[in-house]
Image (cartoon, rainbow, N blue to C red):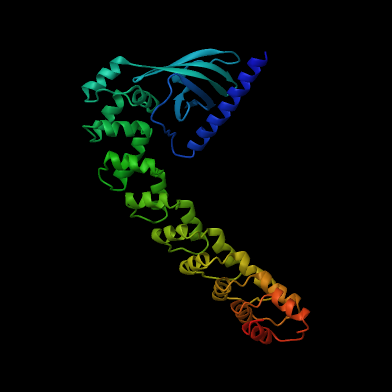
Amino acid sequence: MKRILLTGIAMLALTTLMWSTVVAQDTKDDDSYNGDFPDNPGLWSALVIGDQVHIQFGGHHWSSGASFALSEVGPLPTDKQGSFTVKRDAGTVTFNGVFDSKRGHGTYAFEEDPAFKSYLAQEGFSSISEALMIHLYFTNINKAYFAFMKENGYTGITMHELKHLAEENMNQHVMTNYLELFQKDNYGKVTLDKIVELREHGVSPSFIVKFHDMGYADVPLDKAVELQDHGVDPDFVAEMKKIGQRNITLDEAIRLRDHGVSVEFIRKLTDMGFANVSLEKAVELVDHGVSAEFVRGFRDLGFKDITLEQAVRLVDHGVSVSFVREFRELGFNDLTLSKAVELQDHGVSVSFVKRMQEKGLKNMTLDEYIRLRDGGM
């Protein structure tokens, strides 16, 4: 009984881990997977959502997700161990395990279909490994898939292209979405390598369409890849537009991301009354380490009219909010920002002033303390 309990706990932990990968992958338009060497036999975990069964296959150093229609899967074993099979052109997977409500887990074994392998050989794909056959199964690359590709002008697919189509889960649904985008927006015929590159970099058709809908009519595919690689998604640009950057270009959006300028940063500055903060100024502020909290801190000290240029100068000279506050606590209530910069430049700190006062040098002006410091005190 103890061994059964421990096995159940281990399987539950594995299911949780594997399903977290499914959830992460589900943020894309469709499931995708990685790993060149799937285990066969291996482990699986699943979740039933609507009329779909989302199954995550896993092994020692890889995981792969695939979705199946319930009608394709058939009756699922519930409450007790059982098995079910799912056949596709590439082969058949036999699943052993159990479902508890909408979740399931267990082991699987894949058996490739010799007839489909012969068909692939006729199409020019010889010596296909078991690993690639499993990927063809996951992606559901079948005879109809090859017919679909030929209808759209993709003849003479190479082994290299087939491998990447399978490994990037470029199933017929995914390909249809890309091809419809290319046709609608006049991209012309796009090479398979470029389509795979888009997929690899997370550039979905909807990603490009959203930019088009925001008025960016001309988004080259290379630019779409660059946007995604630099973390510029449609939401980021839309939020920038909402806070006043209505004419932001895609190159400007990339530059903002590269320099760590967030929507929240500009919004905070705007809320403090700094209207029409230019993108160039925002980049400068972040590059110099000026945060919205830094500016607010000086305002809280009474410097209500502090400018962004002054904030940059303060940071560049190492003048912090606490530096000014501590001088005020010593009684220098009329300390200006310019004088604070001068103090810091001459190495006059609060601790230095305190040491001088302990030596009897009290009731002196800040200029006098600067002279003492410059004189080697």
Q: Nearer the viewer, residue 76 or 36?
A: 36
Q: In this picture, is 350 found above or below 78?
A: below
Residue 134 lies in quadrant: top left
Spot the residue most to the front: 376
- Quarter the N terminus occupies: top right
Q: In the shown orientation, is residue 174 left or right of residue 47? A: left
For the question of whether residue 51 can be seen, the reply is yes
Q: Nearer the viewer, residue 195 or 147?
A: 195
Q: Residue 94: horizontal and vertical position, in percent?
A: 45, 15
Q: Nearer the viewer, residue 335 or 19?
A: 335
Q: In the shown orientation, is residue 189 left or right of residue 288? A: left
- Quarter the C terminus occupies: bottom right
Residue drawn where x is 25% and y is 45% of the image: 188
Q: Residue 197: horizontal and vertical position, in percent?
A: 34, 42
Q: In the shown orientation, is residue 353 left or right of residue 314? A: right
Q: In this picture, is 257 found above or below 74?
A: below
Residue 205 lies in quadrant: top left
Residue drawn where x is 45% and y is 24% of the image: 69
- Number of marks present in the image shown: 0
For the question of whether residue 76 can be seen, the reply is no
Q: Nearer the viewer, residue 41 or 50?
A: 41
Residue 191 lies in quadrant: top left
Q: Residue 96: horizontal and vertical position, in percent?
A: 51, 15
Q: Residue 294: horizontal and vertical position, in percent?
A: 62, 67
